[in-house]
Image (tube, rainbow, N blue to C red):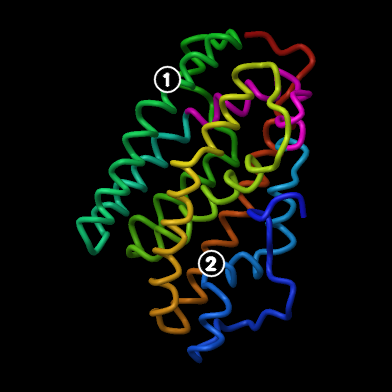
Amino acid sequence: MRNSARRSITVNIPDNYPSDTDSADDVRFTEWCQALSQPEWAAAVEHRFTEQLREGTIDDAVFRQYLVQDYAFIESLVGTFGHALGEASSMKAKARLGTFIHTLTTDENDYFERSLDALDVPESDRREPELMPATRAFEDLLERVAREGGYAETLAVLVPAEWIYRAWAGVDAEPPEQFYLAEWIRLHNNPGFNEFVEWIRAELDREGAAAASDRQQRLARHFHRTVELEIAFFDAAYAAKRDDQTW
């Protein structure tokens, strides 16, 4: 492995999260979920989209399509983080989530505006884009866990969504020349983001370890489904590219 963030468990993983204290201490709940999500986890982190993005070789049309869809998706993501904030059991956790929501709606939103300008994306595609099936499916999952689940269920979707980005962005490499690629990597590999991902993982570790077995299985399924949708989201950027596409 080129980066510790991409580490997965190599021993045999039980279908049920270990209930005895020693085993639970050895295997974090998020590591158990990650291992059960293989090989899709590796496919997401090592997707050609993430590889080409880091190398600076990704086609502008592909990244443009991705960015338009992600910009549309960010509203649902912020809403789900807002739901998690409301469900969090302590003021400290609410404050951490609130700070991250602020980052999404300020620093990240500024990045989107500048990058969409550089990629010549028209206003109509920024405000009312045609959502691709992968984007709709991801939004549906976020809305469903916020509507039907509690804090743990919401975390089970948010953790892999952020952790995957931390994993692929954390690979040591020279930043690409295009600012919209280099900054996207930097937004997902910096001390503040890295610390947040570790914190939100710890939140899910605690919630998951304390949950009943059937709920643990549900959390693991949400986690795995999120990983699958990340792959679909990356795939969709290529599927939508057309040689005659105009903007």
User: Which residue lies under the disc numbered 2?
Assistant: 30
Q: CA distance from mark 2 to mark 1?
A: 31 Å
Left or right: residue 177 compared with residue 125? right
Count of marks, rendered view = 2
Position of the C terminus, as image quadrant, is top right
Q: Residue furthest left?
A: 91
Q: Residue at x 71, y 57 (%)?
A: 40
State which region is magenta: 51-71
Which tag, 2 or 1, sits closer to the chain's start? 2
Above or below: residue 100 compared with residue 150: above
Residue 103: x %, y % from top left: 37, 34
Q: Quadrant of residue 92?
A: bottom left
Q: Amino acid under label 1? A: Asp
In the image, 231 versus 23, the foreground residue is: 23
Residue 219: x %, y % from top left: 48, 69
Position of the N terminus, as image quadrant, is bottom right
Left or right: residue 182 compared with residue 90? right
Left or right: residue 67 compared with residue 9? left
Q: Residue at x 69, y 49 (%)?
A: 44
Q: Amino acid under label 2? A: Thr
Taking the magenta stretch, the answer to whether it contains residue 52 is yes
Q: Residue at x 25, y 52 (%)?
A: 94
Predominant SS along the magenta part: helix
User: Which residue lies under the disc numbered 1?
Assistant: 110
Residue 125: x %, y % from top left: 51, 17
